[in-house]
Amino acid sequence: MTFSLYDAVVPSNIQILGAIDALLDKAEKFCGEHDRAASDMIDARLAPDMLPFGYQVKSCAAHSMGGIEGAQAGQFFPDMKPWPTDFDGLHLAIRSAIESLKGLDREAVDALLDADTQFVFGETRLPFTGANFLLSFSQPNFYFHATTAYAILRVQGVKIGKRDFLGIPRVKA
Amino acid sequence: MTFSLYDAVVPSNIQILGAIDALLDKAEKFCGEHDRAASDMIDARLAPDMLPFGYQVKSCAAHSMGGIEGAQAGQFFPDMKPWPTDFDGLHLAIRSAIESLKGLDREAVDALLDADTQFVFGETRLPFTGANFLLSFSQPNFYFHATTAYAILRVQGVKIGKRDFLGIPRVKA
């Protein structure tokens, strides 16, 4: 097997996004069974000064496909758009990211290895290579928001375990 | 720049473990300032049926250097050893993992790419290539436990933000 930047980033993004998509189904089912409004779950937070479930889910798309698009454009801006406020919208954000990731050309991702990529936030400009942007910024952010989304559901009482977070690891056929 | 399995795994492990090491200092300082026993923080959980802070920290070592050692041995067993119950012990676990990761030979890690690696838990045997074990099992677990450790401190009132989780991203010199 050869190995490249694509292998380091894209398959795991797809794996974990698939797990988040399934978690959304469990969360929605839980709301139905416990007579809780969807908005109650989507607005749930781990702490009062942390952002809610809906933001965490949206950020999984922003730091997977969004990170790659930033590297391709040479600049990544934090996604300040509002997050979806219903489960259909959250599913759409996740599934769109999965489809876009699946459609990526391997060579196009590998070509980002040394590409200049700036993280831009207000006056802040952080210069990265494409690889270091994806691996030392996007990827930790991606897993941070995916885990926080999981943790919010867990704290809210949804019956899930770490397997629901991991999704389908890439075992040998 | 060339790119290999080593680049996909080791630098980010070191980055995030360094962040966790600094979080331990903040947690210990917080305990001192708020007259809380260290054990109270180390036993803190996000939910009653989740594992505590001490376990989350230990698991960051188990799924970084521990995962690589498993791939090298051909078998990875979940780490069932008790976790340290004081901050010194937790620092030691994290710093030992960092030192071991820094000492790894790049070629030795890259040689794990296609190595047979089994995940072994009771009667369960999951077969992986080394790369897919590290990227689709170890790495998501690593970030899961690192984020959960962060979240526990955050919920307990330690004044931290996502930068404390990210540590030092690998910007251009």
Image (cartoon, coloured by chain):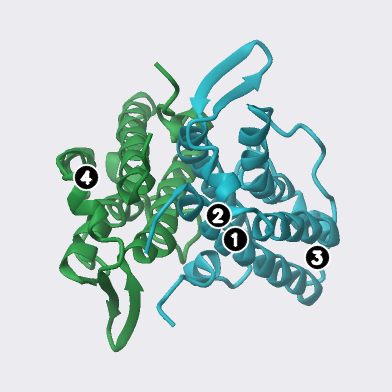
Chain colours: A cyan, B green
Name the subunit of mark 3.
A
Q: CA distance from mark 2 to mark 4?
A: 22 Å
Task: Give the tally of numbered discs.
Answer: 4
**Residue at 44% in and 83% down:** A173
Q: CA distance from mark 2 to mark 3?
A: 35 Å
Q: CA distance from mark 3 to mark 4?
A: 51 Å
Task: Name the residue nearer the viewer: B4 or B66.
Answer: B4
Q: CA distance from mark 1 to mark 2?
A: 6 Å
Amino acid at circle 4: Arg
Q: Name the kind of residue labelled 1 in the image.
A: Ile
Residue A150, horizontal then vertical, whole percent? 58, 58
User: The residue tagged with tag 4: helix, strand or loop?
Assistant: helix
Circles 4 and 1 on the same chain: no
- For disc 2, the chain is A
- Name which residue lies at 37% across and 55% down: B52
Amino acid under label 3? Arg
Of A3 and A156, nearer the camera is A3
Q: Which mark is residue A10?
A: 2
Q: What is the quadrant of the C terminus of chain B in the image?
A: top left
Q: Residue at x 71, y 65 (%)?
A: A24
| Quadrant into which the N terminus of chain B falls | top left
Q: Which mark is residue A14?
A: 1
Query: What residue sits right under mark 3 in the picture?
Result: A36
Residue A106 lies, in percent from the top left, at 57, 53
Q: Quadrant of residue A158?
A: bottom right
